[in-house]
Image (tube, rainbow, N blue to C red):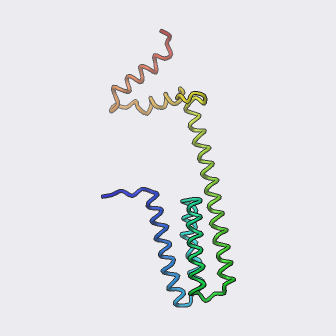
Amino acid sequence: MFSVNKRDRRLSVIIITTVISFIISYICIHYKIDEVYRNLFYVPLLLSCFWYGKKGFYYSIGIIGIYLLFSVKYGSEPFWQTFISLIVFITIGFIIYRLTENVSEEEGHQNKIYQMSYSDYLTGVYNRRFIEEEIIRIDREENLPLSIIMRLLHNSKNHVL
């Protein structure tokens, strides 16, 4: 069997929801149900902006452009109403994109703080806290020769030879 990574699954979900949105939209337009299909495009728009940031925002603009053409050609609603929906879609996509970008920046800052807590800022060498936590992690029966050596090295660093 093949494995699918998280990024591929997310892309598949976005593409599938986009295709389903267009299929249901076509059916709704055929039966003159305007209110339903307009709201279906929020799903791929929000998912793409949330999961892919700027690239997702560009994808959502593409979806919105196709939605505009679709609505003008087949829809029964006035153009101004379609245009307002378009502005709302773009605004919501942009807000989601910017919010996820801010969260990503915050995660980057947290990772940097985490890294700094385990290593020396100037040299990048791991500090005592890291070594002690690694010893606890490695000190298991399956790692027996290595764990004994690590314990001996750790204990001997406190003694002057």
Quadrant assignment, res 95 = bottom right
Picture residue at 54% right of the left edge, 87% below the top:
29
Residue 58 to residue 159: above or below: below
Residue 124's place in the image compared with 43, above or below, is above
Quadrant of residue 127 in the image? top right
Q: Position of 147 compared to 55: left or right?
A: left
**Vertical arrangement, residue 69 with respect to residue 151, above or below:** below
Residue furthest out toward the left: 1
Q: Residue at x 62, y 66 (%)?
A: 93
Check the picture and name the quadrant holding the N terminus: bottom left
Residue drawn where x is 67% and y is 79% of the image? 83
Relative depth, front residue between 83 and 143 = 83
Count of residue discs: 0
Q: Position of residue 39 (x, y in %)?
A: 59, 77
Looking at this view, name the residue that lies furthest to the top. Answer: 161
- Residue sitting at x 65%, y 58%: 98
98 sits left or right of 70 in the view: right
Q: Position of residue 27 (x, y in %)?
A: 50, 86
Q: Is residue 87 above or below residue 56?
A: below
Expressed as whole percent of the image width and height from the top left, the position of residue 118 reads 55, 32
Q: Position of residue 3 (x, y in %)?
A: 36, 56
Identify which residue, 87 or 10, lies in the foreground.
Answer: 87
